[in-house]
Amino acid sequence: MGKRFKRITALFLFTLLFTNVAEADFEKGLAAANQGDFKTALKEWLVDADQGVAEAQYALGIMYADGLGVPRNDVMAVKWYRAAADQGYAEAQNNLGLMYADGLGVPRNSAEAVKWFRLAADQGHVAAQNNLGLMYDVGAGVAENNVMAVKGFLLAADQGDAEAQYTLGVMYDGGFGVPENDVMAVKWYRAAADQGHAEAQYDLGLMYASGEGVPRNDVLSFMWFNLAAAQGNEIASENKKILRKRMTTDQIAKAQKLSIEWLEKHQ
């Protein structure tokens, strides 16, 4: 359970991208924003936003939420997110859910957060699917339901979301919302680990070290611990020291070589 809640503490972070909001009438402001000229972007997007362009409303929400070209103002961020969300704009619906979940610009309201996450998730929005799963996981705004949590995580994981893949691994590892299944845990840990998810790399290393879901393999265990440790995972560093004591010099050298090859392939 500790692993799961460690991830949940990092849930409500903004991943605010401008790449999803480019349209013909929006391009001038977009080009300015991408060059760091937020004054021009603000001018262009205010005109579009006042005319009801959802993309511009969403982008203004981002600017106020992050203080880009304007003083940070969560109330104004909520205003513009809501304007776009009310038009069905999934990115804005997800971010409005985040504002309610964190109590930014509005009183904290988990039920409202769930409402907006669900609307975005129903449109296939990956982050919202993962966020909705996490709300069910902890029982925030909805009754705690690990089966529903798994459903949300699976939707996001199938779209390649590394965080959801990792969390699915945790769910299968512990039997939360699904029957405990080490093979499936390994599958999802590996999917996330291959995207560079440090905690998934660490947990995959644990699976190889103990032979759970895969044949025990100290070389591969050391490799995954090595990769996780390189990203600052201190527990992985400690486990490397423990594992090293039962490995030969050749095994350690092979694990180091595999680590380098993985990094060359994935970076």
Image (cartoon, rainbow, N blue to C red):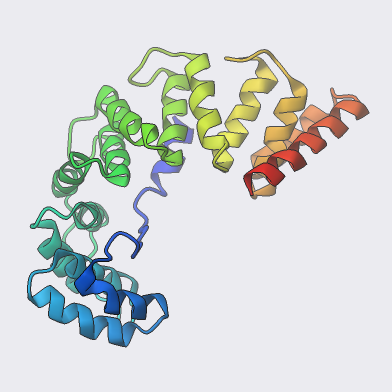
Residue at image location 31% in from the left, 74% down from the top: 30
Quick check: 169 left or right of 225?
left
Quick check: 55 left or right of 11?
left
Count the marks: 0
Residue 252 lies in quadrant: top right
Quick check: 257 left or right of 66?
right
Residue 115 against residue 165 in the figure, above or below: below
Residue at image location 9% in from the left, 77% down from the top: 50
Residue 123 visible, this angle: yes
Position of the N terminus by quadrant: top left
Residue 101, position as x, y percentages in the image: 24, 52
- Between 19 and 206, the residue placed more toward the observer is 19
- Between 99 and 158, the residue placed more toward the observer is 158
Residue 62, position as x, y percentages in the image: 28, 68
Residue 239 visible, this angle: no
Residue 66, position as x, y percentages in the image: 34, 71
Residue 21 lies in quadrant: bottom left
